[in-house]
Image: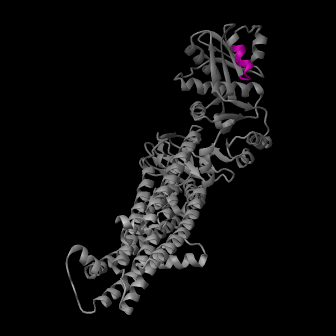
Amino acid sequence: MEGHKHKDHRKHKQHDHTAHIQDFKIRFIVSIILTVPVLLLSEMIQRWFGFSITIPFQKWVLLILSSVIYFYGGYPFLKGFLQEIKKKQPGMMTLIGTAISVAFFYSAFTVFAGFGKEFFWELATLIDVMLIGHYIEAKSVLGASRALEELVKIMPTTAHLIKDSQVVEVPVSKLKKGDIVLVKPGEKIPSDGLVIEGESYVNESLLTGESKPVLKKKGSKVIGGSINEQGVLKVKIEKTGEETYLSQVIKLVKQAQESRSKTQDLANKAAAFLFYVAVIVGTITYLFWFFNGSPDFALERAVTVLVIACPHALGLAVPLVVALSTAITAKNGILIRDRRAFEQAKDLTAVIFDKTGTLTEGKFGVTDVVSLIDQNELLKMAASVEQNSEHIIAKAILNYAKEKGINPEKVENYRTIPGKGAYATFKGKELYVGSPNLLKELGINLKDERIQKLQKEGKTVVFVVIDGKLSGAFALSDRIKKESFEAVKQLKSMGIKVFMLTGDSEEVAKSVSRELGIDDYFAQVLPHEKAEKVEFLKKQGYKMAMVGDGINDAPALVTADVGIAIGAGTDVAIESADIILVKSNPADVPKVIRLSKVTYSKMVQNLWWAAGYNIVAIPLAAGILYNYGIVVQPAVGALLMSISTVIVALNSQTLRRIRSV
């Protein structure tokens, strides 16, 4: 059912956009066709180009043609004008509506009165230019929202359901939690689930931004819409419909596109300000030229002022950037829930990371090896003993050996020594692997400074004894993610202070902090105290971002100026975070800050392109250089305004060049 909803929504949305674009296109075509005779019959055009055409009832024909252009071509602007006036929120439509109405009704008056200069050709060309400007904008907005449509499109429509040992093809919308599906090589995974059989590399790049295919085997989670590249997988469906990762992404992207932006508020205020400036300057201009004995010229100048000042592009400056930047960040595995927080990221002066699961992997692993014999030999012997144990430490050593390409071999006489370790014989040698208590039992004194240093750092140290001699040791702790080093380095290069929060001991916190080059840390912090530490740093004047796993870090995420959830995996609907990092990569934090800066910069550029030209254009439109022979015609005013609109649209599109930051 949910799959149908997505498809219906997509079709409905596409239909709305397409109909909107088609409407402007048809109105523009009709208006431009009618504009040709209006131009040919206009005295001003005939005088400029040195030709003469006269027909019976020429002025009345011009009035009829212009009436169709005004009411049909100008309808979207007149409708918008009325809506803005009703809401008492004057803006771009008010300006356009006022300009074309003044031009039309004054021109109609000249026909009935039999005197005065008509503005039919200016009215017609003004509406034409406005319509083509709107058409280009509508296409730009459609292009910007297409990334979201693409996300919806990547979902497969059918799935291979395993039912009573038979494989049945069913619509994805019919899948339920607990269903088992077969995914063949090259096919898309139909919905979020768990691999219960098979092994394969899965391409998740369109969903999470992870460029390399990810190895999936029994017990691995998979995301609906990702592509199975090699082997055959059997997947148990865990989420359907609105619960799926992709649905949550779409929901968050929509939420971000709809969430208000501080810059958007600024744009709306600027639009209202420009309207009042246009009305005041237009009125002063009209009165000045009217009392200087030029009523026709006075109206022409007033109309031109209203047209030039139109903040049409201003209405597009921010929404286009919002739509594009949200799509770009989503493709990079960065989901924005709150636009205001994302905009604030550019001003951050400090970032505080939770340690476990954020800077570290959140699981026990080997961090250091001290070897008194050949390291590969040490690893092989330790792994060979530990393969017989289910203990977390044994598994960590075994995994580390496998990472190094060393496979364990069969041992004999294996036995556990409760609370101390394990014993076995291997190729005639006696092996012990265990804790400091084991060393005491064997009467071995520890003198190696390297091992003592690791113990002081709060790490768990496991010793290997071969034929009664200490042969090496493994230090284990929660391993630091490789990306954490890059994250801290980049943040510090940006002049941002880096802090760390952890519930671990002082020794562990100090060790991790020193290794990463973190500025300061807070150790032995209970979950409910994390928000207090964030508040403490804010009071010191820092503009703070909190980076955590979004579960026990929720209060701290809310307290920070910007809350960034990491370690979200496929559970992206974290209510307490402003920004969610899908890839669980701390190096995406500096990326968020750089994207925020680029996005804000693009918005400001757009606002200047949209409204800045008015500083020069409005005085010219008012006729300030009339005595020097410089006069801006209403149609030229409309053209300038529309050029600024096109520049804003094109300038926004340059955001697409951002692949990675």
Indicate left or right for 303 with 395 as reference: left
Q: Position of residue 588 (x, y in %)?
A: 56, 40
Q: Does 120 sit above or below residue 367?
A: below
Q: Does 504 sit above or below residue 454?
A: below
**Taking the image as drawn, is residue 413 in sight?**
yes
Q: Position of residue 442 (x, y in %)?
A: 76, 10
Indicate left or right for 371 with 646 as reference: right
Q: How many marks?
A: 0
Magenta-drawn stretch, dominant element (helix, strand or loop): helix
Q: Position of residue 51 (x, y in %)?
A: 19, 78
Which stretch did the figure color magenta?
451-459
Residue 370, by quadrant, is top right
Q: Position of residue 97 (x, y in %)?
A: 47, 77
**Taking the image as drawn, is residue 338 in sight?**
no
Colour scheme employed for the rendering of this structure: one colour
Q: Does 284 sit above or below residue 557?
A: below
Q: Nearer the viewer, residue 570 or 340?
A: 340
Q: Nearer the viewer, residue 430 or 609?
A: 609
Q: Residue at x 57, y 50 (%)?
A: 335
Whether residue 449 appears in magenta in the rendering, the answer is no
Residue 428, by quadrant, is top right
Q: Nearer the viewer, residue 376 or 587?
A: 587
